[in-house]
Image (spheres, rainbow, N blue to C red):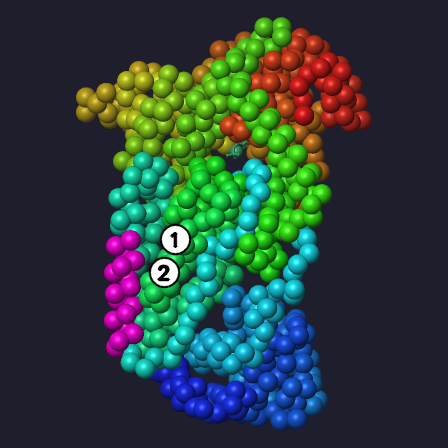
Amino acid sequence: MTSAAVEASRTILTGLHDVMASRSHAQAKLNDVVDVIGKSLDSEVCSIYLLREGMLELFATRGLAQEAVHVTRMSIGEGLVGVIGEGIETLNLAEATSHPDFSYRPETGEEKFHSFAGVPIVRRERAVGVLCVQHADPRRYEDVEIEALQTVAMVLSELITNAEFVDEDEVEGRNAQTGTEQMQGFTLVKGLASGFAVYHQPRITIEHVVAEDIEAERQRVYLAFDKMREQIDRMAGQAEFGSAGEHDEVLETYRMFAYDEGWSRRINEAIDSGLTAEAAIERVQQRTRMRMREIDDPLLADRMHDLEDLSNRLLRIVSGQIGTAASLGLRRDTILIARNLGPAELLEYDRRRLKGVILEEGSLTSHVVIVARAMGLPVLGRVAGLRGFVREGDHLLLDADEGLATARPAPGMVDAFEARFAKSRERQAAHAALRDVEPITRDGTRIQVMINAGLRDDAANISLTGADGIGLFRTEFQFLVSATLPSRERQTRLYRDVLDIAGDKPVKFRTVDIGGDKSLPYLRHDDGEGEENPAMGWRALRVALERESLLKVQARALIEASAGRTLNVMFPMVAEAWEFDAAKQVFDTQISFLKGKKKQLPESIRYGVMLEVPSLAEQLDLIAPKVSFLSIGTNDLTQFLFAADRANPKLAARYDWLSPSILRFIRRIVTTLEPYEVDLAVCGEMGGRQLEALALIGVGIKRLSITPAAVGPIKDLVRTLNVSEVAEAMDGWLASPPPNLRAALEEWACLKGIHCD
Ligand code: PEP
Ligand code: MG
């Protein structure tokens, strides 16, 4: 905030303080409020619209016709006021009529006013009203005026709630929600759970918004910051964080924000503008949320959620309303409801009582999802309107496998869910029982089943599932959950820990595959930003070779972590053989360097490449003599083969993995590599699905690296098939493809008694 903005807000807030302290009737107060704001901003019109029965109704105005008060009503989304209310956005227009959504209301007499600025009045992240100013001159309002309006809108939100101008149930979106409600979301962590809704965040009520004594408010925030930093430091010392690897990264981000001077400065500026400590924290948080809405980068948005988590913590400390639902004690079988959740907040819960989490937001790469996965909690995210549908204590059925949640289910639904749940538990138990069983086909072929991993805790899945090792360790995960580039020491520690946990089972470390959709805010590249086709852009090995220091540091960390053992290293997105040579050269240089330093080196180093770019399939004769293993990344390979963006939901179901194109392509790789001593594997998602795995085995694949939850089902499949039979069937289908290969394979598998769900 500039000092001018601070001054403008302060003038208005001082005026409002007097209005609010007066004994006048609520409507009279609103009339005074528009007067104070209009005068302070030297604006001919100032109006307040409030939510009533789903419409935004003109409640008070200075400058528009008084007859329009309680007469002019706009639907959400209608006119400029409705647009502000719908999008919770700010509008600042020199010429209101030129906006496509302008809607003229003759009763207001507004035709003589040209400029228009409006801000939403927000309560519980919903617009409960709109505050706007209009002026005869066609001019845009200054940024300082907009800042002041936003601050005032926050104060108004408290005033109108205290005066009960808006119906709290309407704010909550709870229009007598009593019936069954089915909600769709996005599966963040798979699983099923039945339990009762508990809101993570008991409502914090801000009693006073306008400061009486600015110095005292400043002191309160200062003390609260101290306390919060203490809490974060204490958490870092707790064993849970100390041992669980990725949480280190999370806490480092937290620390960075907790000690961020910019954040505390912005809060202090808001206090200077006349707000109490609580209101100032909320104001800064509100501004962050607004910015977040404009951010398209999911990773940056995740970091913003961390900041929001801390902001809530600060607000609770300063207001003395300390507890989240975690500190109030949970009932049994809780399903936690939140807009979003910080990872540290989730860790505060008693995991024996917590059964699942439903979020209004959330994304696959967010810290909280990583932590939830480690805690074994199903998570459903991006449930639009969640907090409107669910009330505290509601019975909930969470089916994160299907991306569904049901609130207040009918009895029949509960029975059906319980049956599904019991089946899924039975299946899990049956698969878990296969832990120590070797995946050998009926005709005696040993199929290697490895897991994909990316975090320290994932490595434990090797022994939990009885997998043959880690066939793909996505090293970029450490980079993604970290606020800054992970240091060499951190990288070394992670790799060493993973190797320790894996014991004598192999781990194939893939060097960083960042760039494209996995962009890092702290690693920008001039040409990489705003790429039209990021998946085909500056990513993976291309980044690593250009930013050689990145690969150099990682090479050194991998070599040092593997001292005295075997290092398996794999390069992503290799399109031509020379890219492999260049990457290996970086490792060779590090080895010579460490040799010179008399450091202990790995016992052996095995190099490999991922085959994700079709062009590499045309250079197998060049690459095969150089590598010990090759892993087909079907996720990327499919998108390049079909020219179909893997992240585009519209294309998700268009092309089938069980397509002759893919299967013929893979079979050709198998055949071409036969004369070479190269271990060939498939490590894309395709291999974790039973029917697809069956087809892959049919074209000659004998090594799969898959998500840990799929190990049991794939072992089950392997033990019921004959390689020779499935190979013969596949040969027939690929020579002369049936119209629907999937259906043909499914029917055939069923006939043969192969275990395929
Ligand atoms: C792949 O592309 O198939 C793969 C395993 O790599 P990622 O999913 O990490 O791109
Ligand atoms: Mg890939």
Q: Tell me, yes or no, whether the two marked residues, 2 and 1, touch with CB atoms within 8 Å.
A: yes
What residue is pinned by disc 2?
322
Residue 387 image-quadrant placement: bottom right
Q: Is residue 629 left or right of residue 73?
A: left
The crowd level at tag 1 (other Cα within 10 Å; few <14, some 14-19, many 20+) is few
Quick check: can you spot residue 448? yes
The span picked out in magenta is: 215-231
User: Against 684, is 195 above or below?
Assistant: below
Going 57% across and 41% down the picture, which residue do you hit?
193
Mark 1 sits on what residue?
Answer: 327
Secondary-structure class at tag 2? loop
| Residue 180 placement (x, y as % from top left) | 68, 53
| Picture coordinates of residue 99, whole percent (x, y) | 64, 76
Relative to 243, is 100 on the left or the right?
A: right
Kind of residue at disc 1: Ser
- Circle 2: residue type: Ile
